[in-house]
Image (cartoon, grey):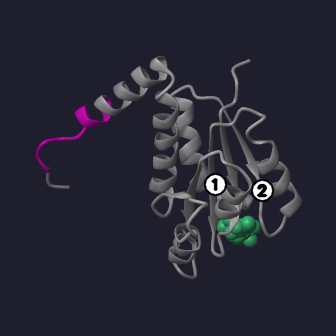
Amino acid sequence: MAQITVGIIMGSQSDWTTMKEAADILDTLSIPYEKKIVSAHRTPDRLWDYGKTAVDRGLKVIIAGAGGAAHLPGMMASKTRVPVLGVPVQTRALSGVDSLYSIVQMPKGFPVGTMAIGAAGAANAGLMAAAILANNDPDLAARLDKWRTDLSASIADEPVDE
Ligand SMILES: Nc1c(C(=O)O)ncn1[C@@H]1O[C@H](COP(=O)(O)O)[C@@H](O)[C@H]1O
């Protein structure tokens, strides 16, 4: 079986509709990944174990999504040197600005690559993970290049009345 190189983690089952956008991109580009619910608040031991074993398990990128007091991405970045891409999940109370602010302002030394709020951010996290892996994988690089070319080709050059 192919080595799993990307971990998608999220604070709650309720984040999955958003985080599935990252998974869909990885599926499209044939990148093996795992998906887990890991919460800094609710399952701190699980977070600790995940971060402690990430390098040895061969993970190259971790995509971490959380909403509200979104401490998961930053805590994971503090526990492993595997690059963490943070996805601020949209919230009802504060529209995800709470999630974004919780993730983006990391102290110097422990960065999180912070994406945009919500589904587009999750999809872009999948694409960013692919781009990182493509640096050392020419076949994946070709698949990603084609994905990008196809997307460009699908954009109409003139607007139409809707
Ligand atoms: N932000 C965090 C963390 C964390 O950062 O560790 N763990 C759960 N959560 C968030 O709580 C929100 C509500 O969760 P529930 O829907 O389970 O009540 C979710 O968006 C989750 O990411």
**Left or right: where 15 falls relative to 1:** left
**Left or right: where 5 falls relative to 105:** right
**Left or right: where 98 falls relative to 157:** right
- Name the residue type under label 2: Val
Q: SS at mark 2?
A: loop
Which callout, 1 or 2, points at the residue further toward the start of the chain?
A: 2
As drawn, which residue projects farthest toward the front? 109
Between residue 123 and residue 56, name the one nearer to us: 56
Q: Which of the 4 quarters of the picture holds residue 69?
A: bottom right
- Name the residue type under label 1: Ala
Q: Report the disc number at residue 38.
A: 2
The image position of residue 50, as x and y in percent, is 80, 48
Q: SS at mark 1?
A: strand
As drawn, which residue projects farthest toward the left? 158
Q: Which of the 4 quarters of the picture holds residue 45?
A: bottom right
Task: Please say if the residues under marks 1 and 2 sit with CB atoms less than 8 Å apart.
Answer: yes
Which quarter of the rendering shows the N terminus?
top right
Residue at image position (65%, 45%) is: 82
Label 1 crowding class (10 Å Cα cut-off): few <14, some 14-19, many 20+? many
Q: Please state the extent of the stretch shown in magenta in the rendering.
A: 150-159
Cβ(mark 2) to ligand 1 < 8 Å? Answer: yes
Residue at image position (80%, 56%) is: 47
The rendered magenta stretch, by its main secondary structure, is classed as loop
Residue at image position (47%, 28%) is: 134
Q: Report the disc number at residue 138.
A: none
- Label 1 sits on residue: 64
